[in-house]
Image (spheres, rainbow, N blue to C red):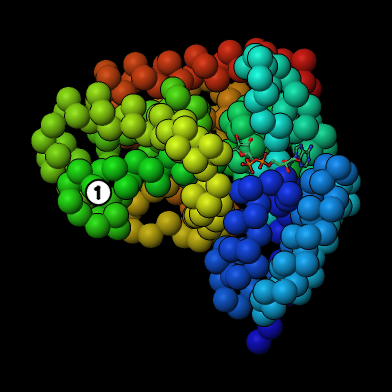
Amino acid sequence: MSQPIKRVVLTGGAGQIAYSLAFRIANGDFLGPDQPIALHLLDLEISGQVLKGLKMELDDCVFPLLKEIKIGHVAEEMFGDVHYAFLVGAKPRGPGMERKDLLADNGKIFVEQGKALNAAASKDVRVLVVGNPCNTNCLIAMHHAPNIARNQFHAMTRLDQNRATFQLAKKANVDTKDVSHLTIWGNHSSTQVPDFVNAKIKGQRVEKVINDRKWLENEFIPTIQKRGAQVIALRGKSSAASAANAAIGALKSVTIATPNDDWFSSGIYSENNPYGIDQDLVFSFPCRSKGKGDVEIVPNLHLDPFLRDRLETSQKELLEERDLVRDLLP
Ligand code: NAX
C-alpha cells in the first residue's frame, strides 16, 4: 500500500554535498524503499541554472520513489509543508575572512531559515543543520522558530562519529559494526571530543581492547579533529559524499528506535542536560531515539578528568560563538 508523500528539503541544493545527498534521498536511502518522496531544493537565486540541471539529472534517474521535485530560492516556498529539512547551504569561509565574520554572515542565513521553517514547515518537521558553524547556526535557527519544538533541531556531528568509528575499528582490526556507543561531545570543530572512554568494541570498553591510552589521547582524538582539514588538503574540496552519507545516518537515527542499548551523537539543545553544560547551547551529546523523532540524552556516562577538561574547552568555544552572534538571537 502506497504511503502519503513525505516532503524533504535540502538547502545548498547547488552545492557539492547536495549533489550526493539529493540522489541518495531520492533513491530511498533515507526514508526506506516504501516511502514516496517530494524533494525541495533551495539555493541562492544566482544558482538557479545549477538547480535546473540537478533537477534534470534527478528526473533522468527515474527513481521510483521520487514523485515531485521543487526548485527555488525563496526559503518560505521551499520549506512549505516539509517533514524533514537538511540545512546544508552556507557561505564558505573566504580569504582573509575572520571566524566572527563567517559566524555573522552564516548566522543571518539561519535567522531567515528559522523564521521560514516556523512559518511554512510541517509542525513535526525534523531539522538537521549541516552548514557550518553548524552548532551555532542550529541554535540561531531554533530560536527563530518558536512554533517548532527545540528538540526537533539537530546539528550534525555524525560525520565525526563515523570517522571515529572507522579509526577505532582499524586500530583494533575489527569490523566497523563492532564499534558502538560512540559519542562526539561538544562542537563540530577542532575542539570536538571523540569519547573513547565510553565507546565499546565488541561490547567491551575500548581501552580494554586497545590497550594504549597514549594512542587514544594523542593520535586518535587529533586524527578525528583534523580529518576534515586533511580531506580538504588532499581533495582540494571539503568532504562531500561522506558528509551526505552522515547526514542521512544522522536524521535516520532520529526517526528510528535506537537499537539495543546503543546511542548516537547529535548536536541538540542543551536545556536540562545532565552533564552540567550551559543550558542554552547546541552541544553534541550521546542520544537515543524511541523511534518517533524525539531524542533523549543518555545520562550517567562516566567522564574522566581528561574528557571533562576537553569538554570544558569545547563548551568555552561554543559560548564564545554564542557571544559573537548575540545580536542575532531574539
Ligand atoms: P558548497 O559551497 O559546495 O555549497 C553550498 C551551497 O549553499 C552553495 O550552492 C551556495 O550557493 C548555497 N547557499 C549559500 N547561502 C545560501 C542560502 N542562504 N540559502 C540556500 N543556499 C545557500 O558547500 P558544501 O561542500 O556543500 O558544504 C555545505 C556546508 O556544509 C558548509 O558550510 C560546510 O562547512 C558544511 N559541512 C559540514 C559538515 C558537518 O559535519 N557538519 C561536514 C561537511 C561540510 O564541511
Residue 277 in view in this figure: yes
| Viewport quadrant of the C terminus | top right
| Viewport quadrant of the N terminus | bottom right
Which of these two is toward me, 25 or 83? 25
Which quadrant contains ligand 1?
top right
The outermost residue toward the bottom is 1
Residue at x-position 66% and y-position 59%: 22
Which of these two is toward me, 151 or 238? 238
Q: Image check: 132 left or right of 242? A: right
Label 1 Cα neighbours within 10 Å, binned few <14 / some 14-19 / many ≥20: some
Residue 19 picture location, percent across and down? 65, 55
Residue at x-position 78% and y-position 67%: 56
Q: Image check: 178 left or right of 248? A: left
For mark 1, what is the residue? 169
Residue at x-position 17% and y-position 25%: 214
Residue 213 picture location, percent across and down? 16, 28
Residue at x-position 79% and y-position 53%: 50
At numbered mark 1, what does the secondary structure look like: helix, strand or loop? helix
| CB at disc 1 and ligand 1 closer than 8 Å | no
Residue 95 picture location, percent across and down? 66, 19
Residue 254 in view in this figure: no
Residue 197 picture location, percent across and down? 25, 33
User: Mark 1 belongs to which amino acid?
Assistant: Ala
User: How many numbered markers are drawn?
Assistant: 1
